[in-house]
Amino acid sequence: MKRAIFPGSFDPLTKGHLDIIQRSVPLFDEMIVAVNTDTGDCRMAVESFQGLLVDYAKQREAAAIVRGIRAVSDYDYEVRMALMNRRLEPEIETVFLMAAEEYSYVSSRLLKQVFRLGGRVDGLVPALVEKRMREKLNK
Ligand code: PNS
C-alpha cells in the first residue's frame, strides 16, 4: 500500500492546491492532505500535524511527500526542503508535480494580500474558502 502526504499551511487553500491534490490522488493508494498547525475520494484524508514533517510522515507510514512546483522560483525552496527531509528520513521520497498553468502564479500569500486590499480572488480559491476569508476580514 503506497500512502503519500501533501503537506502545507494552506492559508488559504487555493485552486492550485486542489489541482495538485487531484493530480496526486490517482498516483497513490491513499493521500493525506496534512495541514501544518504550528503557524479540507475516499483515498484522501485531511489531518493536522505538528513538529517535523518527516516524523509525521514516518508515523503515518507514508512512502512519499507530494509537493507542487509552479515556476523556477519554487525550485530553490523546494529542493532545500526535499534534501533536508531526505537527510532526516532517507526512505521517504519527495515527489514533485507540475501545477496547472492557470494557477502557476497563485500563492496563498499573494491571495491574502490582494484580498486584504480589496482585490478580487474569485476563481482562484474555492467559493467556501472565499466566504471564510470574507468572514475573517469582517471580524
Ligand atoms: O507550502 P508551505 O506553506 O511552505 O508548507 C511548508 C511545510 C508545511 C511543508 C513545511 O514548513 C514543513 O514541513 N514544516 C514542518 C516542520 C519541518 O519539518 N521543517 C523542516 C523542513 S525541511
Image (cartoon, rainbow, N blue to C red):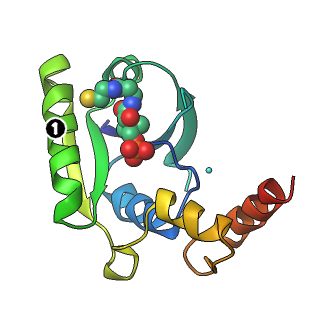
Q: Looking at the image, is 58 positioned above or below residue 116?
A: above
Q: Looking at the image, is 97 positioned above or below residue 44?
A: below
Look at mark 1 in the image and give the residue it sits on: 80
* Residue 96 location (% of width, % of height): 21, 54
Residue 6 in sight: no
Residue that extends furthest to the right in the rendered view of this protein: 139
Picture residue at 22% right of the left edge, 67% below the top: 71
- The quadrant in which residue 93 appears is top left
Q: Is residue 121 left or right of residue 100?
A: right
Q: Splitting the image into four quadrants, where does ligand 1 fall?
A: top left
* Residue 120 location (% of width, % of height): 64, 80
Picture residue at 22% right of the left edge, 36% below the top: 81
Q: How many marks?
A: 1
Q: Looking at the image, is 5 positioned above or below residue 62?
A: below
Q: Nearer the viewer, residue 38 or 90?
A: 38
Picture residue at 57% right of the left edge, 30% below the top: 37
- The quadrant in which residue 126 appears is bottom right
* Residue 53 location (% of width, % of height): 36, 26
Q: Quadrant of the N terminus?
A: top left
Picture residue at 12% right of the left edge, 21% below the top: 87
* Secondary-structure class at tag 1: helix
* Residue 69 location (% of width, % of height): 25, 60
Q: Nearer the viewer, residue 109 or 37?
A: 109
Q: Looking at the image, is 97 positioned above or below residue 118?
A: above
Residue type at numbered disc 1: Arg
Disc 1 C-beta below 8 A from ligand 1: yes
- The quadrant in which residue 104 appears is bottom left
Mark 1 Cα within 10 Å, few/some/many (few <14, many 20+)? Answer: few
Residue 28 in sight: yes
Q: Is residue 43 left or right of residue 129?
A: left
